[in-house]
Structures are given as structure tokens and as C-alpha cells.
Amino acid sequence: MRVIDKTRTWRTLRNTLEGTIGFVPTMGALHRGHASLLERSVDENDFTVLSIYVNPTQFNNPDDLDNYPDTMEDDLVLAKRLGVDVVIRPTYNDMYADGYRYQVDENEFSRTLCGEHRSGHFTGVLTVVMKLLNLVLPTRAYFGKKDYQQYRLISDMVETFFMNVEIVGCETIRECDGLAVSSRNINLNGETRKVAPRLHKLLTSPYSDEDVAKKLAAVGFDVDYLVTRGRRRFAAASLDSNGLAVRLIDNVECA
């Protein structure tokens, strides 16, 4: 497994590769959800590329960026064990040599749900994902449906800009109690970890959106939104864990 820190080094290597390339973009702190994406990529492609880059332009809260977990050594061990061929770890100067002057913006769906509560978040996401897709030039790129809004926006962006890559959506990986696996879960303490599964349990309940939001608030969640759109119910809510607001998102398909 090669670990590459310079985009120019990767671009030189990319010109020598033949066959299909699967790509999994991440911000590190890898967990079983990421592992499932990487396993699928390894199974379906000749080469698998993993990127680890904590993208500052998608954080509207500086504290959230500062508290994002860093588990690089463990991430590299996991990537190697799963059969990843190349890990790309670009720098900010590599990714934003333009100083973030050029941005990819979507002005409808990205303004709702998480976008309504995280100003500029999806502009940062779409911009960095387009950069990474143009850098890696993969055959397929894999995204988890836990971040369903992100998955749909990226799929639509690729279609809109005629990008030659297949976006593969993968089902959410959950703990045995239903909690969606997330890098942020590491910030939950013993008490909030017990409460956190209530988010998924109530999302799958027959109660109305309004009632579910009230029930979540009653057990300690600070609810950003809980809404049903089409055949899917979305939620984002935070738990106070030792003074740190741990924001959890989830969604489920409606019956």
C-alpha cells in the first residue's frame, strides 16, 4: 500500500494505472462504515484509492473542526488490512491553491435539512468532492447513505456536470442497538452513548415528526430538524457530552 501526500505524486502514478479504480473519500477516523465502503470497492475494482483529508471549508463551527478525531495511524493499519492500494493525504495548499476562490454551489436541496443549520457546509463538501474526483479520476466512488443528503447532492452534481464516474450509494452500517456508525460517536460519553440509539428507534416509530422531535428533546437531544421528505425521514440532533455538543444525523426509508 502506497501513502501519498502530494497531489502531483498521485497524478504521476495515476497516468500509469490501467483497469478500474474505486475511490472512497473520507476525513479519516475510519470505522466499520468506512470499512464496508472500502471492502466493496476492493471487491468491485482493480485498484482502490482512499483519501484522508479533513476539509475545513465544510465546517461552519470552528470547535467542530478542532474536535474532529484524528486516528491516522489506526486508519492506515485498517486500510492496509482491507486491501487498499493507495492512500492519498493531500494538504490544504494542494487542495486549495486558489485560496477557495472557486466553489461549487447548489442553491435548492443544499439549503434545506443540514444545509439550513450549517451555513456553507455543502458548498465546502461539493467543492472538495469535485476536486477529489477530478484528481483521482475513479471509475466508481463510494458514499454511505447515512449522509443521504450529501450522497444525493454529489450524485446530482456528477450528473449535472457530465462527470465520468459512477456514484455508488451504500447502506448505513449500524451498531447492534441501531445507532448509525459515525466518526463522531467516539465523542459520546457513557451516559450519552446510552441515549444516542433513541434517535434511530424513534425515527422508525409510527409517531408523527412533531411527536418524535418532542420525544427526542425529552431524553436530552437538541433537535436541529426532524422532517419527512418524500419516502424518507431525516433527523439531526445533538447530545451534550462533557460540554461538547455531539451532532448526530440519521435517516430512514418510510414504509
Image (cartoon, rainbow, N blue to C red):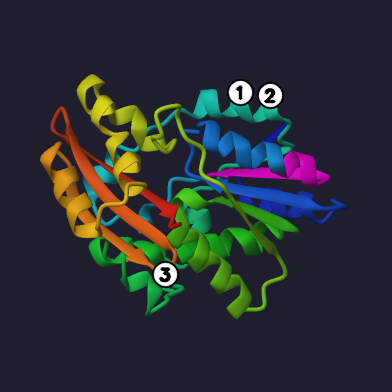
- CB atoms at circles 2 and 3 under 8 Å apart? no
Crowd tier of the residue under label 2, counting other residues whose Cα lies within 10 Å: few below 14, some 14–19, many 20 or above: few
Say what secondary structure mark 3 lies in. Answer: loop
Q: Up-down: is 178 above or below 57?
A: above
Q: Residue at horizontal 43%, vertical 52%? A: 252
Mark 3 and mark 1: Cα distance apart in space = 41 Å
User: Is residue 71 at least partly visible in the picture?
Assistant: yes
Q: Position of residue 3 (x, y in %)?
A: 65, 35
Give the extent of the magenta segment.
41-52
Which amino acid type corresponds to the residue marked 2 in the rendered image? Arg
Q: Specify whether residue 192 is painted magenta.
A: no
| In the displayed structure image, the side of residue 105 where residue 23 appears, left or right | right
Which amino acid type corresponds to the residue marked 3 in the rendered image? Gly
| In the displayed structure image, the side of residue 234 where residue 17 appears, left or right | right
Crowd tier of the residue under label 1, counting other residues whose Cα lies within 10 Å: few below 14, some 14–19, many 20 or above: few
Say what secondary structure mark 1 lies in. Answer: helix
Q: Up-down: is 123 above or below 138?
A: below
> Which of 247/170 is in front?
170
Q: Residue at horizontal 24%, vertical 20%? A: 190
Q: Nearer the viewer, mark 3 or mark 1?
A: 3
Q: Position of residue 65 (x, y in %)?
A: 31, 45
Quarter of the image for residue 179 reads: top left
First in sequence: mark 3 vs mark 1: 1
Task: Provide the residue designation for mark 3.
Answer: 230
Task: Provide the residue designation for mark 2.
Answer: 81
Which amino acid type corresponds to the residue marked 1 in the rendered image? Val
Task: Provide the residue designation for mark 1.
Answer: 77
Say what secondary structure mark 2 lies in. Answer: helix
